[in-house]
Image (cartoon, rainbow, N blue to C red):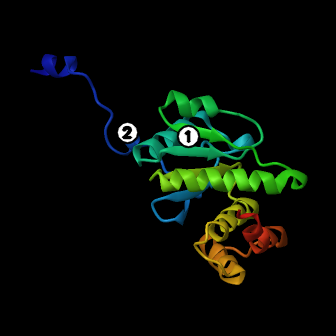
Amino acid sequence: MVYRLALMPQKLRGKWALGITPRNLTWIIKDKLAICERPGGYGVNHRRVRRQEEIIWLRENDFACVVSIIAAPHNLHNYEELGLNYRHRPLVNLDELDPWLKMFYGDLQAMLRDGMKVVVHAEEVSDRLIGLMGGYIRWSGLIDDASQAIMLTERIGARQLDPASRELIMRVHELRA
């Protein structure tokens, strides 16, 4: 009997089969749109095994797409290898921000309208990333009032936003066409 058990294939079980939750995963729209730190961490804190575990968690929790706003295409192939769709939308400088925002928010809206569960990541969960998502909340029409959108975004992000992020939320409604 011991011999038979040794020949049976071992199946990964428990929490390791499900991966680990990405750091600082924060829901912007519950069960639809989230943000997180770059899977695996960033800079000297980046770990290949952690990256793999976090991507597995995203896949096993039915995220349909990962959107990376990091400038460099680092580790995008890992999403593909682990069976998770991704889009690389590097955040641009201020001179090109408005056309980028229109394209980015349009992409997000289309994915969410199609019922996709989406996570957006930067290197870290910064004011810039949180402000970008607050801008989406306002741009999409979920909240029209700028002050309310800022207040909600700060509550979601559990921090007061910097002036640049607040300004983005204030003016993003102008980009709707």
Where is the N terminus found, in terms of image quarters?
top left
Quadrant position of residue 94: bottom right
Q: Position of residue 3 (x, y in %)?
A: 15, 16
Residue that sits furthest to the left in the current view: 1
Residue type, numbered disc 2: Ala
Q: Residues within 10 Å of mark 2 (few under 14, many from 20)?
A: few
- Give the SS element for disc 2: helix
- Give the SS element for disc 1: helix
Viewer-proximal residue, 58 or 109?
A: 109
Quadrant position of residue 13: top left
Relative height, residue 17 to residue 147 (above, below): above
Viewer-proximal residue, 104 or 154?
A: 104
37 sits left or right of 31 in the view: right
What residue did someone put label 2 on?
17
The answer to whether residue 113 shows anywhere in this view is yes
Q: Residues within 10 Å of mark 1 (few under 14, many from 20)?
A: some
Q: Which mark is residue 66?
A: none
Q: Which mark is residue 50?
A: 1
